[in-house]
Structures are given as C-alpha cells and as structure tokens.
Image (spheres, rainbow, N blue to C red):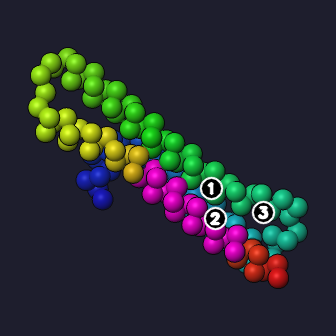
Amino acid sequence: MKEWFVMGGSLFMSILSILMVIVVAVSVYFAVTIANGKASEKANFKQQLRYVKSLGLFTMITGILGQLIGLFSAFTAIEAAGDVSPAMLAGGLKVSMITSLTGIVIYLISIIIWFLLDLYYQKKLA
C-alpha cells in the first residue's frame, strides 16, 4: 500500500487519503445521528445523506485529475526525450492510473456506505 502511495504521487494520493477520511467521518456522523434518533428531527436528513455520495464523487474526480496531470507531465517528458520504448510507456501509463483507481475505489465505498446508511435510516423510521 505504501508503494502505491509513493508511486501514485504524494500530492494527489495525500488529497485522496484526506478525502477518504472525510467520507468516513461524515458517514460515522450520520450513523450516530440515525442511531440517536435525531435524524427524524431534521427536515432534510435524507438529502443530507447524499453528501456521502457527493464526497465520493469529488474523490473520484480528484483521482482522474491526478491521472490527467500525471499523463500530461509524462507526455511532456516523452516529447523531450524523443525515442521511448513501449515498455517504458506502458509502465508510465500503469503508474498514472493509480490515482484514478484509488478515487474510483473510494467512490464505490462511499456509494456502499450511503446505501447502507439509507437502509438504516429507513429501518429506524419504520
């Protein structure tokens, strides 16, 4: 995991890690709110649950942005170097996808968490 973090670029991987912590913290807040019964007191609580999905989507977009910036800098270096082997190009493309994969995984996790929180909320209302 540490290798992925370093290979993916410390800037974007740090941002993605912070966003993952925020997704988990917001999810825990909503879970505690539902468990305490305070969710039914809030008028737009079901709409507020969407924040979990929105944060996950923001994380995915950040990961894709990290990939595009990495690809841009890689193609700039290839242009300056001239002749580059296909194996080196494939390795660079593989590394550039780490941030996108991380962002997509965090987005999938946020959707699963949102779905479970929504089910929990519906169960508590019934």
Give me the residue at 45% from left, 44% from top: 63
Q: Callout 1: few (<14), some (14-19), or many (20+) C-alpha neighbours within 10 Å?
A: many
Q: Quadrant of the N terminus?
A: bottom left
Q: Is residue 56 above or below residue 32?
A: above
- Residue 45, given in percent of the width and then of the height, sits at 80, 62
Q: Describe the element under mark 3 as helix, strand or loop.
A: helix
- What's the CA distance linking mark 2 and mark 1? 6 Å
Give me the residue at 69% from left, 74% from top: 119
Q: Is residue 82 above or below residue 23?
A: above
Residue ID for mark 1: 53
The numbered mark, 1 or 3, whose residue comes first in the sequence reads 3
- Residue 68, given in percent of the width and then of the height, sits at 40, 33
Residue ID for mark 3: 46
Q: Name which residue type carries label 1.
A: Lys
Q: Is residue 26 left or right of residue 33?
A: left
Depth order, front residue of 90/105: 90
Q: Is residue 10 left or right of residue 82?
A: right
Task: Determine if residue 69 is in view.
Answer: yes
Characterize the magenta stretch by its predominant secondary structure. helix
Q: Magenta residues?
A: 102-119
- Residue 120, given in percent of the width and then of the height, sits at 70, 76
Quarter of the rendering containing residue 42 = bottom right
Residue ID for mark 2: 114
